[in-house]
Amino acid sequence: MRRLIFLLVVLAVGCSNGQYPLAPVSGTVTLDGEPLEGAEVVFAPMENDKTTIVGPASVGYTDQEGRFTLKTIKGGSGAVITNHRVSVSFGEVDEAAIAAKVEEITEKNLNMPERKVIALEKKIRQSMTNKKSLPTTYNQNTRLRFEVKGPTEAANFDLNSDGS
C-alpha cells in the first residue's frame, strides 16, 4: 500500500509542470488588420515588467488565419498563469511553404510557361520575405504584454506595420 501511494505521488509530481500552473492559451495575430501567417508568438512569464522570467516560456505559430495555440518549451500545453512579455517574429524563410504556394497556383494553370513559374516563385518569395520584417517593438524591444489568468482563446494582438 505504501508503495502504491509513493508511486502515485511520484507520478503526479513527474507529470505536472512542477511549481508553475499552466492554462491553455490561444489567440490571433493580425498585421494592419490582416491575419499574420507564419509568425512565431512567444510568451515569456514574468512577475512584472522589470523582473526576469519566472517559469518556462511558451511558443505558438500562426496559421493562415493568424491563429496560434501555445505550448511550453518543456512540452506542456498552454502558458504559465502570470504576466507575460510577448514577442512576435519570423524564423527562417519556409522553402516548403513557398514551394506549396507555387504548386497550388501552377496546378490551376497547367500550361503556365516556365519563365512565368520562375517569376511567380520570385514574387511569392518576395511577398513572404516582406512579411518577415516586423517592427522591433513586437520582438527585440517588445512592448506587448498579456496576463494569463486562466484558460483563454482571447490572446489577440493587432499589430501595425509602423510599430505603433
Image (tube, rainbow, N blue to C red):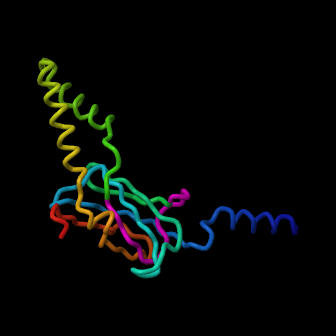
Instruction: Compare residues 88 and 153 and report the one nearer the observer.
Output: 88
Residue 135 percent location from the top left of the image: 23, 62
Residue 120 percent location from the top left of the image: 15, 31
Residue 19: name its quadrant. bottom right
Residue at the spot 11% in from the left edge and 24% down from the top edge: 116
Instruction: Compare residues 95 and 150 and report the one nearer the observer.
Output: 95
Per the rendered image, the range of residues in magenta is 73-88
Taking the image as shown, residue 74 lies to the left or right of residue 151, namely: right
Residue at the spot 26% in from the left edge and 49% down from the top edge: 64
Q: Which quadrant holds the N terminus?
A: bottom right
Q: In the image, is residue 75 above or below residue 12? A: above
Could you tell me how many numbered marks the image carries?
Answer: 0
Magenta run includes residue 84: yes
Q: Which quadrant holds the C terminus?
A: bottom left
Residue at the spot 46% in from the left edge and 76% down from the top edge: 46
Taking the image as shown, residue 16 lies to the left or right of residue 106, namely: right
Taking the image as shown, residue 19 lies to the left or right of residue 83, namely: right
Instruction: Compare residues 107 and 5 and report the one nearer the observer.
Output: 107
Magenta run includes residue 161: no
Residue 102: name its quadrant. top left
Residue 12 percent location from the top left of the image: 69, 66
